[in-house]
Image (spheres, rainbow, N blue to C red):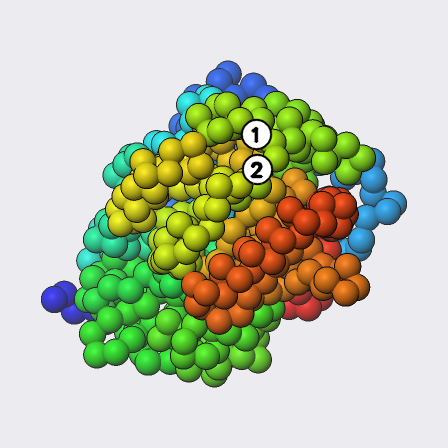
Amino acid sequence: MPNQKTKKEKTTDDKPLNERSVLTDKNEAEKPAKRTARRTTAKKTAEPKEKTAENATAEPKKTPAAKRPSRKAAAKKAPAAEPIPVAAEQAPELPQPRRSVAFIGSECYPFVKTGGLGDVMYALPKALSRLNCDVKVILPKYRCIPQQFHEKMVWRGTFRMDLCADGRAFHVGIMEYVWDGVVYDFIENDEFFSTGNPYTNLIDDIPRFCYFSKAALAALNYMNWIPDVIHVHDWQAALVPVYLRTLFADTPVASARTILTIHNLRFQGVYNVPTIQYWTGLPDSVFEMGALKQGDQDANLLKGGIAYADRVTTVSQTYAWEIQDPFYGDGLDAHLRYHSGKLSGIVNGIETTLWDPASDALIPANYSCSNAVAQKRANKRALQEELGLEVNEGKMMIGLISRLTDQKGLDLVNSILPQMLDGNTQFVVLGTGDQRYEDSFRWFENNYRGSVCSNIMYDETRAHRIYAAADALLVPSLFEPCGLTQLIAMRYGTVPVVRETGGLKDTVQPFNTYTGEGNGFTFDRYESGLLLDAINRAKTLFFTERARWDEMVVRDMEKDVSWERSAMLYRSLYLEIKP
Ligand code: ADP
C-alpha cells in the first residue's frame, strides 16, 4: 500500500489540476459571447481552441498563482451558462434572484436512462430554467448515448487530471450540447465510459464514478463556471461534496453550496477502503466512521456524500422519514438520523410535455380529459391487436411497467396473478431485470395466452402505449423513493393500484367510495392478499360502477403531476443555502 499521507500532501501542495483549470480557461470565461458563437460553428472553431487548451494545460505552473482569481471574485465573474432567449423574454415575471445550478449525475433522458433518475435529470433542470435558474447538467459521455447526440456535441476543452493516490492522471474531455434552455456538459474519457451500459459491476463502476465526480468539479473550474449550487444525484456523484470540501477547498468552485438527492438508498457505492482510497486520492480524514467508512473495512460513497453535503433530499417526504428507520434505511438509518436536520423530501414530478396523451406521437389515439374514455378504448384495442391479446375493449387491462427487481413488489404480483385473471381481465407487463421475474412472467404468458402479455424488454414506445391503453397500473413496491410510473399513469387516465409507501403514499390518494374522492387504490402492509384486495376493489368499481370509474379517470388526468411546484421547492432550497 503506498504511503497515503505522502501522496495526499503532494496532491494538495502541487494543486495540479484545480489551479491549472482556473488559469487555463480564464480568458475563455471572460468571453461568453464568443462561446455562444463557437457552439453554432463548432467544427470551424474546434481546432484552434484545442491548441489553446492543450498548451495551457501542459504548462500550468508558468502562470503565477497570485493571478488566480479569488474564490469570491471568480464566483462573481462566473458567466451565465448560456444566454437563454426564452428566459430573457419572460424576465419581468421570473422569480428573483437568478441562481446558477450544476446538476451532476450518472444518467439523463434522452441521452441515457435506466430509470427514474434519468427522468428527473431531464425534467427538473428544464423546470428550473423556467424559474430563472441557469442550469448546467454534467454527465458521463457514455458510448451508448445515441449517435444523433454525439454528432451535436461541441468540443469545449481538454485537460489532464490527477486522480489516484499514486498521482496517476487521466484525460478529461468536455463536450457540450445546449438544448431547450439547459446546457449539457459531457465528461469524455474512453477508458471509463466506452462500455455499452452506464452501469456494469462495482469493480468497474467505483473507479469510473470516482473519476466522474472529480472530473465534474474540475470541469467547472476549467470552464470558470462557478455555480451557486451544485446539485448531485445518488452514489455515483456523492463524492462531489466530499471532494469539494477537501481537495477542491482552495479552488473557485468551493464557493458553491451542495445538495445531494437520494433517488434510491439501496444503491450506495460500497467497496473496500484501500480501493476507494486509491481511486479517489482523498485524505485519510474522510475515511472515518462519521464520513465514508462503514463497518471494519468498507467505504461508502453515499454515506460520505450525506456527511459532506449542505443539504440532503429524497424524492418524497414519506421516503425521507422512512429511511431513518432500520427497515428502509439500508444500513444508513443511524447516519441519516444523525443528519436529519438537513434531510427533507421533495416529491418528483413528470415532464408533462413529454408525457402528454393529447400530443403523444407514440400512441395511436390522442386524447384529453374531454374524450379520454372513448380514446383510451381505441388505444386498448390497438394494443390488444399489437400484443396478440384477445381484442375486446370490455376487458379490464391492468399494466405493470417496471424494472423487474424485488423492490417492485413482483413477488406479490406473481402469487396473485392466477386469481387476478378472472376471464375478464388482461395483464400486460413491460420490464427487464432479475432472471426469476423475467422467467415467471414468461411462464404466465405461456400459460394464459390471450390474457397475459410479458414484454421482457426496455421499450419507450411500448411504455407509452401501455400507459395510454391500460385501465389500471400496478405499483405494489416493497419500497418506493418516489415512483414515476404512477404519476405517468395518472396523467394518462390510468388508475394506479399502489402500496402505501414512499412517494406512492404521497402522490396517490386512496379512492373513497362514500365521498367519491381519490385517485387510485391503495394497500398498506406488504402482503399479497392486500394487493389482491386492492385490485378487486378496483375491479368492482370498473365493472359495476363505470361512470364513477370514468370520473376517476378524468380526475387523475386533471391532477397536477408536473414539476412546477417541486421545482419551486428546490429553488427555495437553493436560496436557503445560498441566499
Ligand atoms: P425506478 O427509477 O425505480 O426504476 P421509477 O418509477 O422512478 O422507477 O421510474 C421508472 C421509469 O422508467 C418510468 O419512466 C418508466 O416508464 C420507465 N421504465 C421502466 N421500465 C421500463 C421499460 N421496460 N421500458 C420502458 N420504460 C420503462
Q: Amino acid at mark 1?
A: Asn
* Image location of residue 443, percent across then percent down: 29, 41
Give the camera-side residue of 111 and 100: 111
User: In the image, what residue occupies the spot 49% across and 61% down?
Assistant: 531
* Image location of residue 365, percent across then percent down: 66, 25
User: In the image, what residue occupies the spot 72% across and 49% down?
Assistant: 545
The label number, if any, that marks residue 102 in the structure image: none
Q: Is residue 164 left or right of residue 573?
A: left
Q: Amino acid at mark 2?
A: Lys
Residue 259 falls in image quadrant: bottom right
Give the camera-side residue of 346 and 33: 346
CA gap, disc 1 to disc 2? 6 Å
* Image location of residue 496, percent across then percent down: 59, 52
* Image location of residue 376, percent across then percent down: 66, 33
Q: Report crowding for label 1: few under 14, some 14 to 19, many 20 or more residues within 10 A (C-alpha).
A: some
Q: Is residue 165 above or below residue 552?
A: below
Give the camera-side residue of 87 and 49: 87
Q: Is residue 22 visible?
A: no
**Number of numbered discs visible in the structure rendering:** 2
Q: Is residue 437 left or right of residue 111?
A: left
Q: Is residue 579 above or below residue 128?
A: below
Q: Is mark 1 within 8 Å of ligand 1?
A: no
For the residues labelled 1 and 2, say whether their Cβ atoms are less than 8 Å apart: yes
Label 1, on which residue?
A: 392
User: In the image, what residue occupies the spot 40% across and 79% down?
Assistant: 326
Q: Going by the picture, which residue comes out furthest to the left?
A: 1
Label 2, on which residue?
A: 395
Please, what secondary structure does the residue beneath circle 2 have? Answer: loop
Q: Quadrant of the N terminus?
A: bottom left
User: In the image, what residue occupies the spot 81% across and 48% down?
Assistant: 94
